[in-house]
Image (spheres, rainbow, N blue to C red):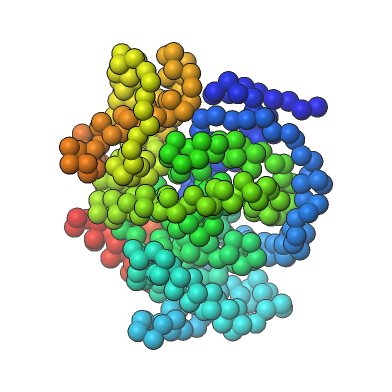
Amino acid sequence: MKIYLKILTGKVFSLSLLVKGFSRFYSGFQSTRCITGTVCLISLVSVSTAFSESVGLETLNNLLTKHPAQTIPQEKISSLPSFEKEVKLFPDRDPVLFQIPGFETFECGKCHAAEELVTKSVGRLRKVITQLETDWPQAKPVPLKQYIIQPYTDKLLQKGQLAHATYDTIRVFPSTILIDEKVYQLNTHRHEALHLNQPFVGHVNELEAYSVNILDDHHFLFLEYPYFADVISVFFEPELDTLLADWLGRDINDRLEVPREVQWYLMPFDEDRLNRLKSSSQKWKPLLHEASRLYREHPYKTAYLTAQTGVRSLLFDLAAVSLLSLPQLDLPQEQIEKAFAVFEQQMTRDDNTRLGYVIDRKQESMMTLKYTSPIKDPNTRRTLYFHYLKQKFIGEDGKVKLTITDQKDFEAFLKRKRETISKMIDYPALTEIERRGAEDFLKKVSKN
């Protein structure tokens, strides 16, 4: 029997999507990754039906089953014997150290030759870095000094992650390479390579890295929708909510080793609807580059404001209100002013940074308006949000103004970031390349 639930907008939503989709995304964003507004009716699809046309899913699952992330006592990681080889990716750059720690310990040599794995990795990274620096000039040069194929989990690369960029280093699981080559078209590597070139950490650098992903492959818009959905819904694609709900509402098989995001990616979907979304991506591109510019010109302010408000899409939202004409508001002025007061009350709170909460103040405002005001249409509430941003953050010259209202809280935020980096430097399993990179990064942050 199909069960449905009304949430947020009063429209009908599949319980399958709520349980299998939302819980995964909202819980996962506390680490490194993470639908607002309206939702729609979705029919439940059986697992057998959903995957009957999926090409390569069984093969991929078998490969991932054979390449699980191993567990090892943390104190033994630094003493693992490692296969290492230095290779020059590009003639005019320093060589990159390729490592496979525990290659013999975990008996990887029974099926693989270490030299061959490194050779394939070299080709993969040359392709990724060349394309990234061409398509996203802000990324140049990518300062890669070390690439680690890591067969085990640790504090730097945890279960559930695909990869992690530390300092001048990319760490990946063997299973990540399989997924990235066979499904994601190397977008995980592209994402992590960009991280190496970024000036600071937080949701702002994830927004930029996912921007690179969605321009290369629009499927990543569905997987990382909190960073982009509101702008695209209001300014470009009014039916995005329905499209997102349909795409994420398909049932997946929890028994497989294939991550649910990969299963969604592989499952058949209406190509006409996907192509319509893809065709509008060139319209978003200037906004993505403007968000990147804001981040790179003001890395500390933008990181703080994004953390303080809990709005992962904040820079993309600001880019939209600074470059685009806003939709008209057909509301009494009194309602507009009351709505602005709700946004101001929420968006200026410092609970997120002061107490360590993770609360999206934009969504808190939307929910408050939904239940305490006569403004019931979700698109109207979104439009009000963008009008509020323009009033608060856009100057008379049309440029974005990033104002920090609580300097002490801002300084405390940066202090905590520096402390986190310092703790990471002391982690015994950090390589010497990573440690030197972290020390250089810490000096830069402290100086600025």
Horizontally, residue 215 falls left or right of residue 58, namely left
Horizontally, residue 335 falls left or right of residue 52, namely left
Between 184 and 232, the one nearer to me in the picture: 232
Between 240 and 447, the one nearer to me in the picture: 240
Horizontally, residue 394 falls left or right of residue 190, namely left
Q: Quadrant of the C terminus?
A: bottom left
In percent of width and height, residue 207 lies at 41, 50
- Which residue: 72% across, 65% down? 63
Between 420 and 368, the one nearer to me in the picture: 368
In percent of width and height, residue 242 lies at 60, 35
- 272 over 101 or under it: above or below: above
Horizontally, residue 11 falls left or right of residue 325, namely right
Q: Quadrant of the N terminus?
A: top right
- Which residue: 58% across, 20% down? 10
In percent of width and height, residue 443 lies at 24, 61
From this viewpoint, is residue 338 visible? no
Between 183 and 75, the one nearer to me in the picture: 183
- Which residue: 76% across, 39% down? 45
